[in-house]
Amino acid sequence: MPQNYLEDFLPDLADFRDHTRRFHAGALTAAEYKRLSGGFGSYAQRGSAKHMLRLRMAGGRLTKRRLCFIVDACEKYFIPRIKLTTCQSVQLHDISAAAIGNVMEAAWRAGMISRGGGGDFPRNIMATPLSGVLPEEAFDVMPYAEAAGEYLMGFIRAVRFPRKLKVAFSSSPANETHATFRDLGFVAKSNRTFDVYAAGGLGVRPYMGVRVADDVRPEDVLYHIKAMVDTFTAYGNYESRAKSRSRFLQETLGTDGLIRAYQEKLRQALDTEQLKLSVSKQPVTKKAVGPLLCGNRILPQRQKGLYAVFYQPVGGFLSPIKAAQLSRAIAPMEDAEIRLTPEGGLYIINCNAQEAALLCSVTQDGAQTQFEASAACVGADTCQAGIGRSQTLLSACIAAVRRENFADGVLPKIHISGCPSSCGAHQSASIGLRGGMKQTASGPLPAFAFSFGGCAQQGQEFLAEPDKSILSRDIPAFFVELGRMIAADHSSYENWIPHNQDRFFSLLERYAR
């Protein structure tokens, strides 16, 4: 991170500290405080006694230095919870009012500026987590994601956005970062160029992105970011927050109109800006040590004899104790670093066989099945905007399913969002759940609406909308019964569901009554 950004933003901390003091003195409402604190990547949690801080890290690169800071901050400031987010950033939770300003300043000085981590700003840049080490990918997009992240920081004080802007890079058809349905997405191709998608997004009234440019040279990505910024600020809705996301440009401009507007802004950027990129990356020269490995959490890298180790903390919550264990384990490992996934998990990359075996032992407390690797937002227990208790529900479902001892794959990975904002990306999941309330004879009770058949795979994208709602208390039993049906057929959810959708919906209907 260039030093000038630190110097630019440090004076802003005085405003944040003052607003925090006034908020806890009762001089500001939660809504008034949120309008300022969000721009610093911080929000007061439900109950307003504690705070969250969201740390930006382009592409989800959690380096040794960054991890060491997080571990030290948790110890120094008594921070008990670390959340890995679906936008490949890290949230520190339950920070006291007295400490939040100090934690923020320390993070900035350690190279993790939280400015723009919330509010109406460019958010954390996303990238395929294994980019650069993935055996089958178009090319390494990480250097361009990091350059884009630095460039977008320059807009935080210079441009007033209608709402947040999310940018993603994808290097493989798995489309883990949802690059084809973000505000702006760069999809790598085998000819070492990008296709560019714009004005997509999840949440209320989701939209697939519109392909606005083809065969873009990687060195030109910043021109396209400038074009999208200018398109969004020129045509975005500044009046209605409900329609202030870029995806609503598809309604106001139409698909063809959006493409024309984008191309016009692109031509202006090409004519007036000097944004050509020249990136370099040090190759991994680490030598293989030990025998060849295989395992469901050990992935061979494109670098022969090196591995990535996958670890999914249940619910995406990494304990400070586990973070410290990971930090100590990877400290002596040459070239090792952590890459955060868009589902609240992580990979430790550039491990030789001996190191991979050690890290598998260190991380054996994580998810053991696809179902246990499910993604969930922080939920209404913590989030002031939340409706459903996402983490509580996921924990109850996992506990109920574990007692059945189903084989891995009998139940799929699910995505849970506590509200329509889709922070758990429920609309892109094979089974998604969205928090809400359901009217019953006893009055309104907590419930989650189910969506079915979402998919992020490039070329097969589908955004599913929630349908039937099940009371929160009954959802663990639903998944147990679904698992029993699939296990009785000696199948997996992936193989079972195409031929048994009628049985699935019959079960859903019964629990939704």
Image (cartoon, rainbow, N blue to C red):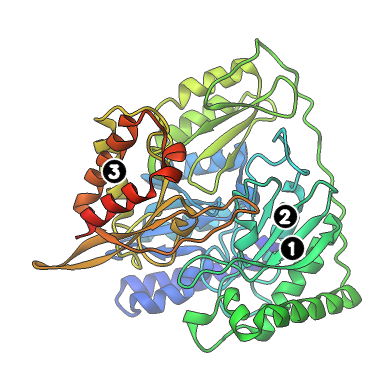
Residue tagged by mark 2? 187
- Residue 145 in percent (x, y) is at 71, 53
Question: In the picture provided, is 208 more to the left or to the right than 480?
Answer: right
Residue tagged by mark 3? 479
Give me the residue at 64% from left, 52% from top. 458
Q: Earlier in the sequence, mark 2 or mark 1?
A: 2
Q: Earlier in the sequence, mark 3 or mark 1?
A: 1
Label 2 crowd bin: few (<14), some (14–19), many (20+), radius 10 Å: many
Residue 471 visible in the current orientation: no
Residue tagged by mark 1? 196
User: Which amino acid, mark 1?
Assistant: Val
User: Which amino acid, mark 2?
Assistant: Val
Q: Residue furthest top?
A: 291
Alpha carbon distance from label 3 to label 2 = 35 Å
Could you say whether the residue bearing mark 3 is in a helix, strand or loop? helix
Residues at marks 2 and 1 touching, judged by CB atoms closer than 8 Å: yes
- Residue 28 in percent (x, y) is at 35, 79
- In the image, 17 versus 449, the foreground residue is 449
Which image quarter: residue 18?
A: bottom left
Question: In the picture provided, is 311 more to the left or to the right than 285?
Answer: left
- Residue 7 in percent (x, y) is at 68, 64
Q: Residue furthest bottom?
A: 239
Give me the residue at 48% from left, 40% from top. 72
Q: Disc 3 vs disc 2: which is toward the camera?
A: 3
Alpha carbon distance from label 2 to label 1 = 6 Å
Could you say whether the residue bearing mark 1 is in a helix, strand or loop? strand
